[in-house]
Amino acid sequence: MKKVLCMVLAVVLLLGVIGFNEASAAALKKEYKLTMNVSTDTAWGKGGVKFAELVKEYTDGKVNVKVYPNAQLVGGDQIRQAEMVSSGAIDFMLNSTINIAPIIPECNVFSLPFMFPDHEAVDAATKSAGGDMVFQALEKHNMVGIGWGENGFRELTNNVRPVAHPDDLKGLKIRVVTPIYVDIMRALGANAVAMNWGEVFTALQQGVIDGQENPIVGVIIPNKIYEVQKYLTNWHYSYDALILAVNKQVWDGFDPEIQKQIKKAAEDSMHWQIHDVSRVGLKDGLEFLKSKGMIITDLTPEQLDAFRERTKPVYDKWVQNIGSDLVKVFEEAVAGSR
């Protein structure tokens, strides 16, 4: 009788495990959507594709992430991506902090003028408690940050003259994205123009605007800005970080083992995107732009100080929007990287 009971119990337990595994598998969706602003052939886009590939590999095909580039899930409205992931309408995003900042102001910390002198300073900040604080801000909006990517330092281009001093920007019409950039350009004497990215190339071509600011590898080269712009100022005035994030309910729906596998996919794909794609292409990118006839202006520390001094009131103003505690942690991480 005891043997029979033991056998029955073993069968019940086995069926229970099988049923649990089947239920877990059934809970997984056939497809998880990932939204990005850009095409898949950009440095940014390649990171999203790599993440999807590694998720499938690391989860043995249990989780299928499909990449939707060019903000096609939101009709091209880049700002809505974070809102849609927050609501659960979209599962994942690989998004710029610039586009997340309108709903999560802590993301503006990366846009503070002349905060980061180099990539080492950026890496120190994202790996610090400050990086964790930004991810905590995401959680308040129903999202979980699982990785940092890179669009890069935003450099200035224009078609009027070299820019080596704040006064050189006076009167230039520069296309910008968000309010903090409007404030920065106005502080430097430029006329800040808000414009949908899809209109920028033609506007530059026709002289409607004089210039724009964007990362070299991520935007300027793949969008052939060199065809309609003559001058580039290599000034690292702002850094464009990427955040790989997932809706919190979607994340909580994964069992711990799958969460671990997806997190590893995020870390590995973003490390590859930053170090093997974005930064590797930067040196060659500058040489490429020179070969296309662009005149590159590299600023000395003294020249940079003039820009930093002119934009300090903007910096101080936006600290209040971002949060002084977060900014202080970032500043300490940057100082420690030198």
Image (cartoon, grey):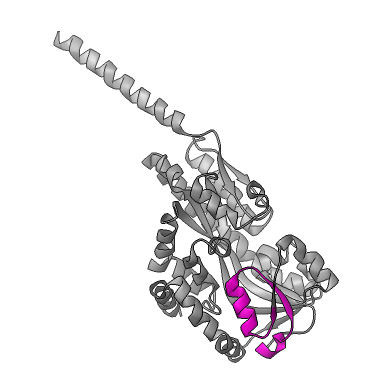
Q: Position of residue 206 (x, y in %)?
A: 85, 70
Q: Quadrant of the N terminus?
A: top left
Residue 165 shows in the view: no
Q: Which residues are magenta?
A: 165-191
Q: Which residue is at a point 40% across and 27% down the rendered structure image?
A: 23
In the picture as drawn, the residue positioned furthest to the top comes out as 1
Q: Position of residue 113 (x, y in %)?
A: 56, 78
In the picture as drawn, the residue positioned furthest to the right comes out as 206
Q: Which residue is at a point 59% across and 72% down the rendered structure image?
A: 179
Q: Position of residue 243 (x, y in %)?
A: 52, 58
Above/below status of 46 relative to 296: above
Question: Left or right of 215: which side holds 16?
Answer: left
Question: Left or right of 126: which side holds 7?
Answer: left
Q: Position of residue 33 (x, y in %)?
A: 57, 43
Above/below status of 244 relative to 2: below
Q: Nearer the viewer, residue 143 or 219?
A: 143
Residue 94 is drawn in which quadrant? bottom right
Q: Which residue is at a point 66% across and 78% down the rendered structure image?
A: 234
Q: Is residue 9 magenta?
A: no
Q: Is residue 185 magenta?
A: yes
Q: Nearer the viewer, residue 148 or 282?
A: 148
Question: Left or right of 141: which side holds 37?
Answer: right
In the picture as drawn, the residue positioned furthest to the left comes out as 2
Q: Which residue is at a point 70% across and 83% down the rendered structure image?
A: 297
Above/below status of 310 relative to 151: below
Q: How many marks?
A: 0
Residue 19 shows in the view: yes
